Amino acid sequence: AEIVQLKKELQRQKSGKTLNYSDTTESNSNLDKLNDERHRFRKRKRLIAKNPDDREHQTMELLSKFQNKLDEVNRNKLVDISSSDDSVSDEEDVTWLRHQMEFDEERMIEARDVNVKGKDTFAIYDPRNEMSKRRRNESKKKHK
């Protein structure tokens, strides 16, 4: 049994996966949290459908669940916002779902389309863009 354990330890050292048992309990708890979160996200990833049609169906189901939750919260305005308990966790808190977006229509600014040329349009220039880089290099060659 000791030989097998020593062989495994040597293999771990060779592959660079050495286990350090001198960690404190705090770092172990952090590692445990990290591993739990990784496991949770891997589990979620497996649930995501591979087929685009299935993904669309899955997305629509999630949307309908959210809409149902919104409708339920709006129907049941039993819990007063001012009397909300501090013991309620963020995941259970639904007060934000009751919020109504309100804005002044007078303050609405007309959006401008970047593709439409006009007297008050601005030139959009991104130096990281491949086309901009090519033009810059061409103009450097012409000036030399």
Image (cartoon, rainbow, N blue to C red):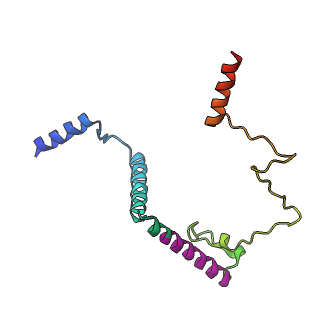
- Above/below status of 141 relative to 55: above
Tell which residue pokes out farthest to the top in this image.
Answer: 144
Could you tell me which quadrant the C terminus lies in?
top right
Confirm whether the magenta stretch covers residue 22: no
- Above/below status of 32 relative to 18: below
The quarter of the picture where residue 63 lies is bottom right
The quarter of the picture where residue 9 lies is top left
The quarter of the picture where residue 106 lies is bottom right
Q: Residue at x 36, y 42 (%)?
A: 23
Q: 29 or 101: nearer the eye?
A: 101
Relative placement, left or right, of 32 versus 138 is left
* Majority secondary structure in the magenta region: helix
What's the magenta region? 57-78
Relative placement, left or right, of 100 versus 109 is left
Q: Residue at x 52, y 69 (%)?
A: 59
Residue 78 visible: no
Confirm whether the magenta stretch covers residue 58: yes
Tell which residue pokes out farthest to the front in this image.
Answer: 142
Task: Give how far across and how far down residue 25 sits, in percent.
Answer: 39, 48
